[in-house]
Image (tube, rainbow, N blue to C red):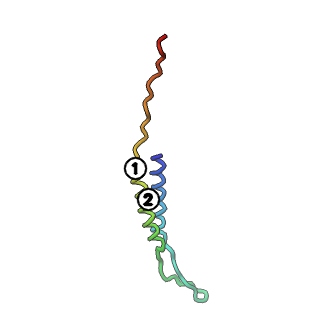
Amino acid sequence: MKGSIVGLSILVLAISAFLCFYPVEYGYRIGEVTLYTWVEYPYRDYGFILSLVGIAVLVVGLAIPKKVGRSVPPLTTPPY
């Protein structure tokens, strides 16, 4: 369980990094010429929020204690 939560948080952090640095180029056409004016990163806010969620899930996933198995006493047969 712990490994899957940590893996999920790493996936969320990777997606948030992609959203933070995904450029969108805006432009407009005048006749046959396309003029590109600027490049923006419109998903940067969503990526930042998603990275905070990923870090929180990572901290919670690392805080979960490792599952400790119970030691079962050996079976003893009653003396007859």
In the rendered image of this protein, does residue 31 appear above or below residue 58? below
Residue closest to the far top: 80
| Disc 1 target residue | 62
Name which residue lies at 47% across and 59% down: 12
Q: Is residue 5 above or below residue 36?
A: above
Q: Going from the N terminus, do you reach mark 1 or mark 2 first?
A: 2
Which residue is at 44% across, 59% downward?
54
Q: Is residue 31 left or right of residue 45?
A: right
* Res 74 quadrant in image: top left
Could you tell me which secondary element the residue under label 1 belongs to? helix
Position of residue 67 relative to residue 17, above or below, is above
Q: Residue furthest right?
A: 32
SS type, badge 2: helix
Residue type, numbered disc 2: Gly
**Residue in the picture at 48% in, 67% down:** 19
Q: Nearer the viewer, residue 49 or 10?
A: 49
Query: Picture coordinates of residue 36 (x, y %)?
Result: 52, 82
Few, some or many C-alpha atoms within 10 Å of disc 1 (few <14, some 14-19, many ≥20)? some
In the rendered image, which residue does mark 2 sit on?
Answer: 54
Q: Nearer the viewer, residue 18 or 64?
A: 64
Please, what is the three-letter code of the amino acid marked with disc 1?
Answer: Leu
